[in-house]
Image (tube, helix red, strand yellow):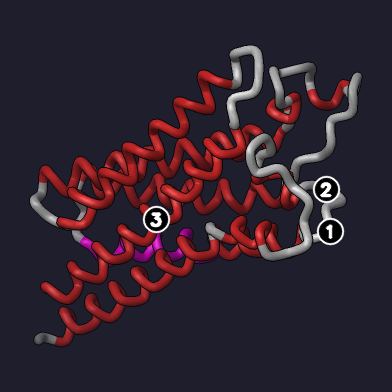
Amino acid sequence: MTEPARHIRGYSLLIALAIALAGLCYSSWLLEFVLPIHTDPVNTFLSELDAEGKPYRAVFGTADKIVGLLLIPAALGALLVFPRRGLTTIGWVALLCFGASTIADTLLPLHDCDPGDSSCGGDSGLFPQLHQPHAMTSTLAVTSIAVAAFAFSAAAYRYHRWKILREFGVVVLLIGTAATLWMMIADNLPGSYALGIAQRIQVTTMSLWLLALAAAVLTESRAS
């Protein structure tokens, strides 16, 4: 193995490790079942775990910041180290945006919406919180990782690489897409449609996809 190839392999391992750790940190919401938090997973959003005034806001907020602080340099490193191709470039840039949006999520936390609270921008079905600035950062985060997932999935087929993204990654992506559609449609319908469950499925698929991407990068480095 030549010296440049050895360096690229080393960088690839670091990038894969950062992405994997980010995926694990993004599943920190599972601590709601361990910590003494009285939540209703069926009908509450995960953003409420680190909302203003919540007792464990520091725990969940720190985990999200770590996600961003890991993914931003990982995406930048990938853009510098790996060969530039159209779809993968889109994927890495989108992943960088996801990391930045996740940090912004913690800097613009959710706050309670009392009846008549004008700062929430009015009612939005079951969740008036959706009118808060936090909704914008959350939407950017979800959109960014969706773009990244679709771009890398397309790249895996087009460039005949990353078998794990062509198989496991695509399954996770489809489940996440179904959960997102569930949330988008149900929130505009009268009644309760377990949007909390839908979001938890969505976020779980995001974490699993990050782990799949990390495995793909690691496999690619070993094959090179």
How far separated are the C-alphas under marks 1 and 3?
A: 27 Å
The kind of residue tagged 1 is Pro
- Residue at 64% over, 23% down: 192
Q: Nearer the viewer, residue 116 or 31?
A: 31
Residue 191, horizontal then vertical, whole percent: 66, 17
Q: Nearer the viewer, mark 2 or mark 3?
A: 3
Q: Which residues are magenta?
A: 69-82
Indicate which disc residue 18 carries: none
Residue at the image point whose x is 31% and y is 58% from the top = 213
* 3D distance between C-alphas at marks 2 and 3: 28 Å
In-image side of 169 versus 167 (left or right): right
What amino acid does circle 3 point to?
Leu
Q: Which residue is mark 2?
A: 52
Q: Position of residue 60 (x, y in %)?
A: 68, 59
Of callouts 2 and 3, the N-terminal one: 2
Question: Mark 3 — residue?
Answer: 208
Locate the C terminus and report the quarter of the image it occupies.
bottom left
C-beta proximity under 8 Å, tags 2 and 3: no
Q: Earlier in the sequence, mark 1 or mark 3?
A: 1
Say which amino acid is labelled 2.
Glu
Percent coordinates x, y for residue 164 in the rendering: 21, 57
Secondary element at tag 1: loop
Give the secondary structure at mark 2. Answer: loop
Residue drawn at the location 59% of the way across and 15% of the way down: 188
The one nearer the camera, 155 or 188, is 188
How packed is label 2: few (under 14 Cα within 10 Å), some, or many (20 or more)? Answer: some
Query: Mark on residue 55?
Result: 1
